[in-house]
Amino acid sequence: MIAAIGPVAALVAGLVTSLHCAGMCGPLACAACVRKNGSGSLAAAAAYHAFRIISYGIVGLLAGLIGRVVSDVLLGGTTRWVTWAFVVFFVLVATGLDKRMRFPPAGKWMAGCLGASDGVFVRAALLGTLTPFIPCGPLYLVVAAAALSGSALSGAAVLLAFAAGTVPLMFALQSQYFRMGSRWSPATLDIVRRALALVSIVLLVYRSTADPSLLCQ
């Protein structure tokens, strides 16, 4: 059954599992697209999704090209290291230490070009790019389908369609959060920002240590 999945079926799968995605990645996606002053950025959210879709497409292309090797990498230790790197980042956000961080010259240049002095666009784009390497049961299944698709283009199409299906609900969640945040005081925004980081830490630790089969639930 999984071998027969195509782009249309993958798109439907993305729409169906988007509630799961919102619950498991929503806090991360919101926290990564919030400026240091606590205000949200829809443009950064758009960058997050754009880079996430591109990254999914590349994973699908590689899966279709070389088969189960990509699936084995995602199910192996590589994803664990990426996940724990995110845990460190959100610990910095939760403790407020991220506000004291300074970007290297290249990072400052990128942030300036993207119109974000605090690097929110760079952060959102980075998270979007690395999202496929955060443990995710539904994603593993779709990557396996891409690996069985028989070609790089078919594999890319399957993952691109799946990623596109997860965007509407996630972007709606981010938009609603940012709209609510515009009415809060700076102090409240900072508390919520840190709370999002704490929730993200809990979710990442769970996803890094849980049995892969549990992540499909």
Image (cartoon, rainbow, N blue to C red):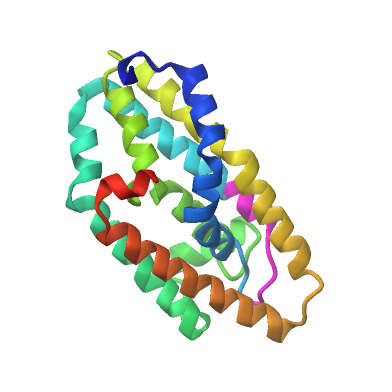
Q: Position of residue 137 (x, y in %)?
A: 34, 43
Residue at 29% of width from left, 21% of height from top?
A: 64
Q: Position of residue 194 (x, y in %)?
A: 55, 78
Q: Is residue 206 left or right of residue 46?
A: left
The answer to which image quadrant residue 204 occupies is bottom left
Residue 102 on the magenta segment: no
Q: Is residue 172 left or right of residue 149?
A: right
Instruction: Establish if 153 lies above or below 122.
Output: above
Screen quadrant of the N terminus? top left
Say which of 154 and 26 sits in front.
Answer: 26
Instruction: Establish if 108 lies above or below 212.
Output: below
Q: Report the number of discs.
A: 0
Q: Is residue 6 left or right of residue 44?
A: left
Q: Position of residue 162 (x, y in %)?
A: 48, 30
Q: Is residue 99 left or right of residue 157?
A: right
- Magenta-colored span: 37-47
The answer to which image quadrant residue 72 occupies is top left
Residue at 43% of width from left, 16% of height from top?
A: 6
Q: Position of residue 158 (x, y in %)?
A: 43, 23
Say which of 11 and 119 sits in front.
Answer: 11
